[in-house]
Amino acid sequence: MVCNGHNSIGAGALSLKQLQASTEDYTRAIDIYEDRFEGKMRVKAETITQMVCGETEDREVLPYGLYSDGRVVGFCLLTLYKKERFVYADYISIAKDVSSRSIGAAFNIGARFLLLMGEEVKRLTNTFVLFEAGHAALVRVYKSLGAGIVDCEHIMPVLDMTLERVPGKVAIFPKPESIGKDRYLECLKTILFKGYAEWVTPSLCPDDAARYIEYITGIYDELKGLLPEEIYVI
């Protein structure tokens, strides 16, 4: 797919549009991402742009902006892994001036953002979203949009290996009838090594890059050992 900036889906006053890296809207969306993501979870904006502009045979990185009345108010990144046949959604962020509205209004905007993403990813393929555990409201939103939550433990890596890892959950759009252990491990391995490792290590010195690969490998091996024989999606 070519990032042509013309694909959009409307929902009331909100719309989701694919962005071009060379535009002011893309810059605004990246600024929102940098403002909203904590340092321990934030990849450099330059790295995101390099990935967006560097399509490969097996991966395409698609930046999207959330628009409200023609103004960019949110950002998300969809990475299409062609060989593995799934999409990984990440860096979902909404501008402070939007999310600081009343709780009900902010929640409604966030939910509609996810709804727009859900409509877009249905056009692509199955989509995986990783999020921090403990957000019951977010689980309800994902489920209301047709996603399923993988009923097993997950760990979200952080950029600073000295910090505690973050307990996580995995949502899959649309909810599958079931997911085999081998398929789940294939997607998990792709997210950890082609996602986290390939995005983080270019900004590290060689020794730290090697340690980060070991760190990711340790998380993968731990999660693999924790997986039950039957994986339920609820």
Image: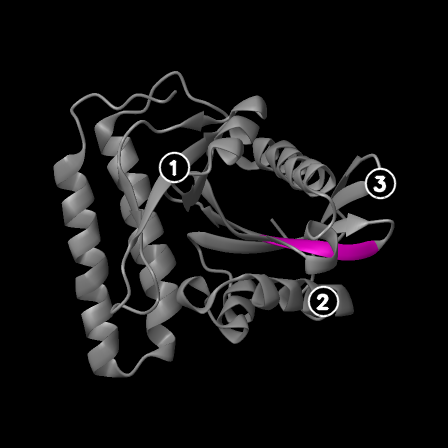
Left or right of 30, for residue 73: right
Give the residue type at disc 2.
Answer: Arg
The main secondary structure of the magenta stretch is strand
The residue at 66%/38% (across/down) is 107
Question: Which residue carries the number 2 mark?
Answer: 28
Count of all numbered marks drawn on residues in the image: 3
- C-alpha distance separating marks 2 and 3: 19 Å
Name the kind of residue labelled 3 in the image.
Ala
The boundaries of the magenta stretch are 71-76
- Assess disc 2: are there few (<14), some (14-19) or many (≥20) residues with their C-alpha within 10 Å of its C-alpha: some
The spot of residue 186 in percent (x, y) is: 27, 40
The answer to whether marks 2 and 3 mark residues whose Cβ atoms lie closer than 8 Å is: no
At 32% from the left and 79% from the top, the residue drawn is 204
- Residue 45's quadrant in the figure? bottom right
Question: Residue 23: percent from the left, percent from the top?
Answer: 74, 68
Tell me the crowding category of disc 1: few under 14, some 14 to 19, or many 20 or more residues within 10 angstroms, Cα based.
Answer: many
- Choose between 82 and 211: the one closer to the eye: 211
162 and 71: which one is in front? 162
Q: Which residue is mark 3?
A: 13
Residue wearing tag 1: 170
Q: Mark 3–mark 1 contact, CB under 8 Å?
A: no
Amino acid type shown at disc 1: Val
Q: Secondary structure at mark 1?
A: strand
**Residue at the (15%, 46%) spot, across then down:** 222
